[in-house]
Amino acid sequence: MSAGRICSRVTATAWPTETVRDAAERMAENDVGTLVVVDPDGASRAVGIVTDRDVAIRCVGGGLDPVSTPVSAIMTAQVHSVDEETSIEDALARMAKAGTRRLVVTGRRGEMVGILSLDDVLGLLTQETASIGRLLEKQEPHIPG
């Protein structure tokens, strides 16, 4: 299975110049913990990632004012990505190598098409494990007692 098949195609975004408070409000509105920070020129090119943890640790915990601090001051600027045709196994290897729980998923022209999280992969594994369990239950021999 490919990264593009299980990634979240609805991705909340932020601008590097907007305030941390505005970004946090968008997280709350969209019920997400991650925003992909996109190039301010309007292209769908990821230039960073900001998480609820970044807001808590880097901004609030770092004594910064969320009303005046730009997202660019607390975002992770190194964006790790995979093509939507990348296998889940290769995507997981990329996550492990980069030490990240999220990858931006890109399309044929390099544009952002979604975000793949470790939770997406764990959800898939949970579904597959449950299917295997149901199969095994059906194949158990039933010996009258």
Image (tube, rainbow, N blue to C red):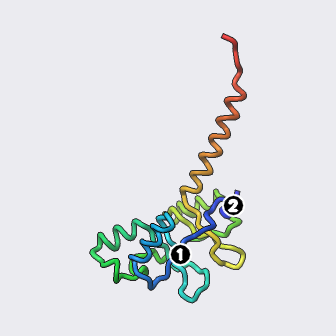
In the orientation shown, which residue stands out farthest toward the top?
Answer: 145
Inspect the image, locate mark 2, and give the three-letter code of the amino acid beneath it. Answer: Arg
Location of mark 2 (residue)? 5
Foreground residue among 65 and 6: 65
Location of mark 1 (residue)? 13
Per the image, label 2 sits on a secondary structure element best described as helix
Q: Is residue 37 left or right of residue 10?
A: left
Inspect the image, locate mark 1, and give the three-letter code of the amino acid beneath it. Answer: Thr
Q: Are there few (<14), some (14-19), or many (20+) residues within 10 Å of tag 1?
A: some
Residue at the spot 61% in from the left edge and 84% down from the top edge: 43
Q: Are marks 1 and 2 in contact (CB under 8 Å)?
A: no
Q: Earlier in the sequence, mark 1 or mark 2?
A: 2
Q: Quadrant of residue 38?
A: bottom right
The image quadrant where one finds the N terminus is: bottom right
Distance in Å between CA atoms under marks 1 and 2: 20 Å
**Is 142 situated above or below 85?**
above
Q: Quadrant of residue 63?
A: bottom left
The image quadrant where one finds the C terminus is: top right
